Image (cartoon, helix red, strand yellow):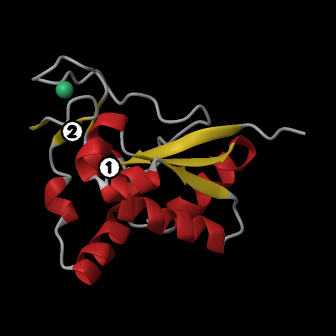
Amino acid sequence: MDDRTVVYSTYYNPMEANIIKAKLEDSGFACFLADENVSTIQPLYNQAIGGVKLIVFERDVEAINALLAEDNSLDFESTDEITGEGKSAEGKTVCEKCGSTNVGYGMATDKKYSLWATILAFLTFTTPIKANKCHHCYDCGYEFE
Ligand SMILES: [Zn+2]
């Protein structure tokens, strides 16, 4: 049996991660979050450990890709997605502060989740969209354009 797991994606926003997790579980996919508790209690520490990781079984990755893609039938940019080896570093953006390449572009690299983030923002009266419009260094927490 192939029970290997992979990091499907990493979320800077723990709430976003929980939304995706709930969605996958609703559809029958086993998954869990790593570092969730730490990041929820101490958001600053979250930046140091690289956010909340969504772990799934490798065998489910393609089906999950298809499932999540369905949510975004209007988003034509969500086709070049994860291939099964977890999320590769998008581009070679370098942190302006510490020089790390462990840099994400927030929602911009996970555009297919923007609808959920919007819903979340509405429900919680927060503005995650705004926070996601810049690069974020997972090593030192520095954010820049
Ligand atoms: Zn940095």
Is 87 drawn above or below residue 62 in the view shown?
above
Who's the residue at 15% across and 44% down the image? 134
Q: Quadrant of residue 3?
A: top right
Residue 96 located left or right of residue 76? left
Residue 66 located left or right of residue 144? right
- Which of the image's four quarters has the N terminus? top right
Q: Quadrant of ligand 1?
A: top left
Q: Which mark is residue 136?
A: 2
Mark 1 Cβ inside 8 Å of ligand 1 = no
Q: Which amino acid does label 2 sit on?
A: His
Secondary structure beneath label 2 = strand
- Residue that carries the numbered disc 1 in the rendered image: 12
Secondary structure beneath label 1 = loop
Is 81 drawn above or below residue 122 in the view shown?
above
Count the numbered circles shown. 2
Who's the residue at 31% across and 45% down the image? 46
> Residue 95 at what x, y percent from top left?
17, 24
Who's the residue at 55% across and 70% down the image? 22
Q: Which amino acid does label 1 sit on?
A: Tyr
Query: Reading the chain from its start, which is encountered first: label 2 or label 1?
Result: 1
Q: Is disc 2 surrounded by few (<14), some (14 to 19) or many (20+) residues within 10 Å?
A: many
Residue 75 visible in image: no
Is 56 drawn above or below residue 23 in the view shown?
above
Mark 2 Cβ inside 8 Å of ligand 1 = no
> Residue 137 at what x, y percent from top left?
22, 33
**CB-based contact (under 8 Å), mark 2 and mark 1:** yes
Is 46 drawn above or below residue 63 in the view shown?
above
Residue 40 visible in image: yes
Determine the CA span between mark 2 and mark 1.
9 Å
